[in-house]
Amino acid sequence: MTPRHAPLVLASALLAAPAAMAQDAPTARATLENADGMTVGQATLRELPAGLLVMIDVQDLPPGAHGFHIHETGACSPDFQAAGGHFAPQNRPHGFAASRLPHPGDMPNLHVTEDGRARAEILNARATLHEGPTAILDDDGAALMVHAAPDDHRDVDSAGGRIACGVIESDG
């Protein structure tokens, strides 16, 4: 290896390190279904040093912005009400616009394209999978929820009805 190639090799190694670390991180998954019981998407959750990385891929949803949250209970039926409210341990408030430390259930809106699809990677620095007071895989689990309307990031009820839900399950 010539000296002029050394920086390229070092940069490649540094770029590969986070990917390798991410592959060893604890993970969980959720299959999202609509109210008719049809599968509309998949999500993978990966615990990283900076927080919980939520990777979601959905289809067959109405175009536009939709509230997207972690809900407090790992159940979806009936009518997605079994998932309870937003995951809010430690009594933190709802909304990025209302608080510097919103509850861990808050995430940015999911933006669905005209063809009914959305793919996103969201880093939630306030939640964990297994450890601590903000662990979503506690005794009653948690669920991912897509709402009918966008979240205004102030009012917990702004996102409206629930249109897709998926129980979060540990990969091991």
Image: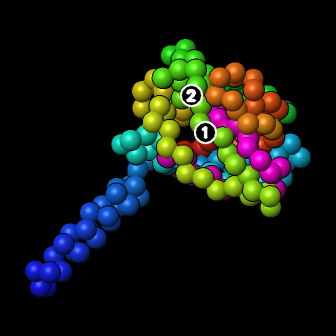
Q: Position of residue 102 (x, y in %)?
A: 53, 24
Residue 109 belongs to magenta span: no
Residue 80 visible within the image: no
Q: Is residue 60 above or below residue 160?
A: below
Q: Which residue is at a point 30% across and 61% down the rendered structure image?
A: 17
Q: Nearer the viewer, residue 67 or 162?
A: 67
- Residue 115 placement, left or right of 103: right
Query: Which element carries disc 1, helix, strand or loop?
Result: loop
Q: Residue furthest right?
A: 36
Q: Residue furthest bottom?
A: 2
Q: Amino acid at mark 2?
A: Phe
Residue 168 visible within the image: yes
Q: Quadrant of residue 137?
A: top right
As measured in the structure, the alpha-carbon distance from the residue carrying label 1 to the one carrying label 2 is 9 Å
- Tell me the magenta residue range: 53-72
Q: Colour scheme in the image?
A: rainbow
Q: Which residue is at a point 75% across and 31% down the rendered structure image?
A: 159
The reply to whether callout 1 and callout 2 are in contact (CB within 8 Å) is yes
Q: Which residue is at a point 55% across and 51% down the rendered structure image?
A: 121
Report which residue position mark 1 lands on: 108
Q: Amino acid at mark 1?
A: Pro
Q: Position of residue 162 (x, y in %)?
A: 80, 35
Report which residue position mark 2 lands on: 96
